Amino acid sequence: MKVHRQSQSIIVSGESGAGKTENTKFILRYLTESYGSGQDIDERIVEANPLLEAFGNAKTVRNNNSSRFGKFVEIHFDAKNVVVGGFVSHYLLEKSRICVQGQEERNYHIFYRLSAGAPEDIRKKFHLGSPANFHYLNRGCTSYFSTKETEGSIPQNRKSPQHLKHGSLKDPLLDDLCDYKRMCSAMQRIGLNESEKLDLFRVVAGVLHLGNIHFEETGSSSGCGLTLSSEQCLECCAELLGLDQEDLCESLTCRVMQTSSGGSKGTVIKVPLKKEQAINARDALAKAVYSRLFDHVVHRVNCCFPFESSSMFIGVLDIAGFEYFEHNSFEQFCINYCNEKLQQFFNERILKEEQELYQKEGLGVNEVKYVDNQDCIDLIEAKTFGILDVLDEENKLPQASDQHFTATVHRKHDKHFRISIPRKSKLTVHRNLRDDEGFLIHHFAGAVCYETSHFVEKNNDALHMSLECLVSLSLDPFVKRLFKNDNKRNSKQKAGKLGFISLGNKFKAQLNELLDKLKSTGAGFIRCVKPNLKMCSKQFEGSQILSQLQCSGMVSVLDLMQGGFPSRAPFHELYNMYKMYMPDSLVRLDPRLFCKTLFKALGLNEKDYKFGMTKVFFRPGKFAEFDRLMKSDPEHLSELVERVKHWLICNRWRKAQACSLCVIKLKNKILYRATACVTVQKFIRMFLCRKKYKHRIEGLLKVSGLRRQLGQMNEVVGTLKEGRVEMSKKVTNLEATLDSLNMKIKVISPAVLVYSLTSAVIFHVSAGCESEVNRRLGRAWGVMDSLDNGVWRCRYLCGRTKVRVFRSLVLPVLLYGCETWTLTKYLR
Ligand SMILES: Nc1ncnc2c1ncn2[C@@H]1O[C@H](COP(=O)(O)OP(=O)(O)OP(=O)(O)O)[C@@H](O)[C@H]1O
């Protein structure tokens, strides 16, 4: 960012448990500690993590501290590269976990940390107990993470029977009791006051009690009612969420409908819900409340490091990698879609753009093939036909069903090679699915079979109107605020109809916004690789590691790296970075020559770098090596400068000798084919006509013996065609010439290139007294180097032979335009 003056992003990716979050934390800490303002804003950015992790991370079978949401953390800097603030965007919190988890998994950490660590008064106030007492926790793992030291500090009545029987969970980085304290101090440090903290805890407890409300068929009607034991939970939940107890009960067991036709149009009626429907309503409410709470936590965190303006930012993206389980649902579908997009970005940035750059700069690196996944992205996100839009259409149908949606997807894409029916899966468990129960997508990283049951439900982010009204009119100002925007939407939503907010398309929009942002920055990638599935250190399972590298496109990248040059810098940037270490005589050099001279003098291995048209490219790690050499101690530096000077002179001399030989050889080789020719003599004569330059050029010709050499050159330039020489292009200064060469090389003929260069040199060498000639000489050699560029490009235009012609045309001019003794002086 400092060098390129451009915002940067770092995309950290990998499987669950590979280390994305840990590494993201290292990056954030590094940036804030190295470039922080020394004020508490730096600390706040780092301290936001324990809070976000408490609400958004959970124990899964793959990772004890798995982030169940994606985040993009931007650290903003001012013009002096000092941290001024931060901003966190979050993506796709896994909502299903709030209500149910796998047997060995847990709900979000906050539930357990609160149970294990909250002081007795909070515990009583929020009616908390052991995790085993809560329906939303007790179907998964109910044990706490603890260590030997903290195990004794957790009161027995807070531990579940599972914890008491099997002991606590162990992880060097997790401890629910300590983490509770850490989270509280993080809250304090980032500026949350006591009442804000309690608001968060109260809603968390409210969700737990909501889950304990159970229903039973009433028998008398088709509806259901609360079980007897649930009355107490209803009371707790209503109290904690600021709801009226009766309203809550009614909203969970009935749905308000408004008749839309007939004489009774507009009449509001209550339709009792069946037990299953009531359970769904309860879970939907719990998910909505918790996810709003999470949105609020992120929002609140963002308020802790505000900034008015910033010059640039470095963003770190930590988002779940490609996922494939035995059973894959809408969550995996979204996350894999996201990974397809990120992979495409990676391909474009690392492989496509890189190769295009190599080609443009003429490095001659072999092409690396990679799979373009645009077709898979289109399959998911294309308008009308894409799976996301098909799903939205299904959601809008009066009788939406997962089977109908699946059948439509298969019908619309029956010939698409990326999608097939579950029967085509290699796994038996998928082959047992009916055609309308799932689809198999061939992702860049492998085939994944998605089971489509609940896709329609999961794609809808809206709550039933009765429930939305209930919470958005809560007596608790905090809960009310969580649902503030919904209140406005309610007034527009028709009673009885489940409003529809497409989660899939919301995610698509978020993702496209994120990608636009990433594309506007310089991007770096960190691929985390999980060494084994056992969550233990120092064990490396080769085949698993290899498959992760293949999935993430690393194999193609390594191919490219092997033949490529991952670090690069434009000549002028290197020039600006190192000119302060060099004496004036070298600073006067053209940036390209300056760099070349340095590299040669330093004795860098020529395999480690390459000169392109505008940049110098390095093999991995070589730029750092070079930088270290340049920034070494002053004694070493002065020795280096002497070496640079010596190399420069020797090289010029060698070039001069080589070019003389070249001219003589060419003289004997080249056939004169052109009919209408313009000779060098002709254009020299034209310059002589211009009074302004006449005496200088004449003088120069005398001194340098150029005239004799020109005689030889006349023969050489037989290939220049008069009609293509653009005499009108007056070369006014060297830089302009080079600019115009770089810009116009593709449209002008090689003849013009030679003409422009030659004339530029004559102009400049002849532009002043002897010392000026010497000074200009440095520049003139710059032309030579630029000509090397020209030579490369010309290779494409007209082949090697003519390229040599160009070199030999210009070199003698340069050679005899300088005073030989200045060269030989150094050589001696
Ligand atoms: N650099 C590290 N040093 C020590 N332990 C690490 C490091 N990176 C990862 N780990 C271990 O691996 C575990 C998983 O890491 P992390 O939570 O960062 O994975 P993740 O890729 O973010 O997973 P998910 O996608 O599930 O969130 C950590 O809890 C820690 O135990």
Image (spheres, rainbow, N blue to C red):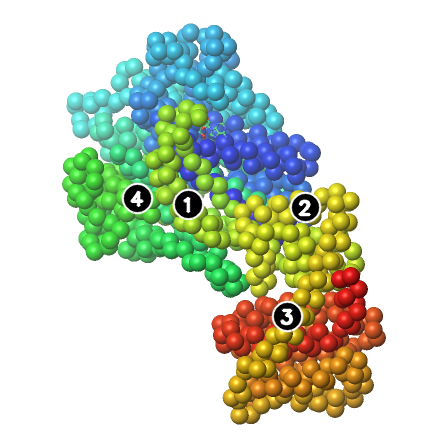
- The label shown at residue 629 is 2
Q: Is residue 813 above or below residue 34?
A: below
Dot 2 or dot 1, earlier in sequence: 1
At 47% from the left and 53% from the top, the residue drawn is 563
- Nearer the observer, 603 or 665: 665
3D distance between C-alphas at marks 4 and 3: 57 Å
| Mark 3 residue type | Ala
Packing grade of label 2 (10 A; few <14, some 14-19, many >=20) is some
Residue that label 4 marks: 446
Image mark count: 4
- The quarter holding residue 646 reads bottom right
| Of pointers 1 and 3, the one earlier in the residue sequence | 1
Residue neighbourhood size for the residue with mark 4, other residues' Cα within 10 Å, grouped as few (<14), some (14–19), many (≥20) = few
Helix, strand, or loop for circle 1? helix
Give the residue at mark 1. Answer: 554
Spatial separation of the CA atoms under disc 2 and disc 4? 45 Å
What element does badge 3 sit on?
helix
Q: Dot 3: within a 10 Å radius of its alpha carbon, few (fewer than 14), some, or many (20 or more) residues?
A: few
Image x and y of residue 60, in percent:
37, 27
Q: Which is in the foreground here, disc 2 or disc 4? A: 2
Q: Against 815, is 99 above or below?
A: above
